Image: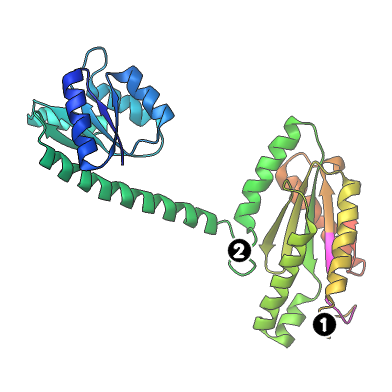
Amino acid sequence: MNILVVDDKKLIRDLVSAMVSEIGHQAYSADGHIQALEVLREQSIDLILMDVEMPEINGFELTSLIRQRISHWFPIIFLSGNDSEDFLSQGIDAGGDDYLTKPVKQVILAAKIKAMERIADMQKALDSANQKLAQLSHVDELTQIANRRGMDKFLENAWQTNCRQNAELSLMMIDIDYFKQFNDNYGHQEGDRCLKKVADMLSQSINRATDGVFRFGGEEFVIVLPFTPSSGARFKAKEIIGRLNELAIIHDFSKISEKLTLSIGLSSTESGADSVTRLIEQADKALYQAKELGRNDYRVFKNT
């Protein structure tokens, strides 16, 4: 562990640092709040051994400051000759995690560090699990592309960025034609395989890091194209329809083709969308029009 020893008295600071090193950890030292904050900026610290009685800013005040400024958690153990209940309570309220009375004994220090190391490891594992859970909450389980929740976050960020840069933003609402008939006749397993193939094809069709593909729900997908005018979105829609045609997924129960097809609705900020909600609504209206006019094609929303 990387352990920071904070004490204004050099003798004690050096003594505790030497103990930390002998126990087998990397010791850093600071004589007060200024040096302590510098070390925290420059090093990845896993534990702080904090003296309480220091001039200018005492250990409790410095701990409160650290907890306010640094988002990730690490344990802080106070060092003091005062072991009264009120003093201990103050330390916990300030954000401390444990307490050692001076003079510090190496065997007790080693035990405290080992206990805090276990707690820190559990905290890291919990943080990692929470990060994975957050990622999973934005990913569609079947297709492994981002889901509606992921789209909402991505689209909001893209909208703000494009507004700041006065750039065009386009959105494609994509629907698999007659997917219900496909699912009902070929079975849900084949329907799931079909959705995966379409999701993979859509993912491969976007070649910019700024673009995003999402499963909107059911057999509907969305592609967000930042920094893209309507003309660019139309070109991409034609490409996607062609890519699916090349996959040649048989659909004997379609009313328009022997192969699986898509209908696409396009909207963009060029068509007057003044919010994310309006952009989605306009793409949905264009998709409805594409279906009404025969499917296996795309339509662009136009203000009437």
The residue under label 2 is which amino acid type? Answer: Asp
**Quadrant into which the N terminus falls:** top left
Q: Main secondary structure of the magenta part?
A: loop
On the question of residue 91 being in view, the answer is no
* Residue that numbered label 2 is attached to: 140
Over which residues does the magenta segment extend?
257-264
Residue 181: which quarter of the image? Answer: bottom right
Residue 284 lies left or right of residue 57; in this view the side is: right
Task: Indicate yes or no whether the magenta region holds residue 258.
Answer: yes
- Does residue 90 sit above or below 296 in this rendering? above
Residue 285, numbered label: none
Residue 240 lies left or right of residue 107; in this view the side is: right
Task: Indicate yes or no whether the magenta region holds residue 72.
Answer: no
The residue under label 1 is which amino acid type? Answer: Ile
On the question of residue 13 being in view, the answer is yes
- Image location (x, y in percent) of residue 164: 73, 30
Residue at horizontal 72%, vertical 48%? 209
* Residue that numbered label 1 is attached to: 250
